[in-house]
Amino acid sequence: MWRDALLIAAKDLKIELRSKVTMNQILPFAFVVLIVFAFALDTSPGTLAKVAPGLFWLAVLFSSVFGVDRAVAIETNDSAGEGLLAYGVDPGGIFLGKVISVFVQLFLLEIFLLLGVVVLYGPKIGGLPLMAISAFFATLGLCAAGVTYSQLASASRAKQTLLPLLLVPVASPVLLAGTKAWQDAFSTAASLGDPWLRLLIVFAVVYLALGAIFFGSILEG
């Protein structure tokens, strides 16, 4: 399963390097979201700094919808996913490979977004270990849930509108916990024992396990 996962991830990342969709389309979209939020809210530095964690994770959530949709579309176009199953590729490996490839792209995008948040909102960055670890598990959870629900939505003719309806409510715990964990990281309450970090870990582990177990049934359905 892990061998297949690494092969799928490498394939998808090579496709992304050639197309540059994340850098040319998704990243500019995420920056536009941050800028719109800055204009929509009170422009005083104090207000923007306070809401910076929430706005960051909202931009990440919106971006993840595009990322997972594209990752799954690679295999659904021309029934490529059925071909992988016929060739004997482990369904769990396909799922984990998709999660890994989307995770790498989304995590790199978050680094650029964090720089944008610092420039636009001016928060005081502290508690870097808590920020990094919570971002790792939040992104992992988003990718695992996103790949699962994107594959479910791919069978529908309205998959472009169905995916956000499925994913956004499910990802709400990640949005909440990621925001709270980063708020703690920005304050003196930064600790790797943060309860919101534990929630992110549980969410990521649960969706990774569910996806690895049931992805084959979803593909065949």
Image (cartoon, rainbow, N blue to C red):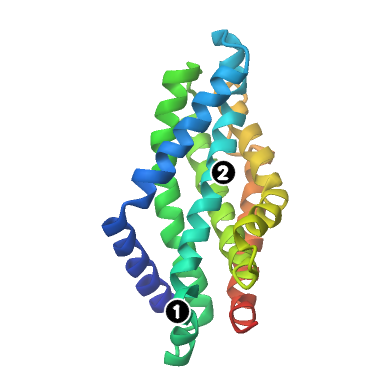
- Which is more N-terminal, label 2 or label 1? 2
Mark toward the viewer: 1 or 2: 1
Query: Which of the two residues, 114 or 155, is positioned nearer the viewer here?
Result: 155
> In the structure shown, which secondary structural element does the residue marked by tag 2 occupy?
helix
Q: Is residue 32 left or right of residue 15?
A: right
Report the residue at 57% width, 11% height from top: 43
Residue at numbered disc 2 = 62
Would you identify the image quadrant in which residue 61 lies? top right
Query: Which of the two residues, 142 or 125, is positioned nearer the viewer here?
Result: 142
The amino acid type found where label 2 is placed reads Phe
Report the residue at 43% width, 45% height from top: 26
Find residue 119 and report its horizontal and vertical position in percent: 41, 19
For the question of whether residue 136 can be seen, the reply is yes
Residue 78: numbered disc: 1
* Location of residue 201 with respect to 3 vertically, above or below: above
The amino acid type found where label 1 is placed reads Asp
Report the residue at 69% width, 38% height from top: 176
Q: Quick one: label 2, few (<14), some, or many (20+) residues within 10 Å? A: some
Q: Residue furthest right?
A: 169
Q: Quadrant of the C terminus?
A: bottom right
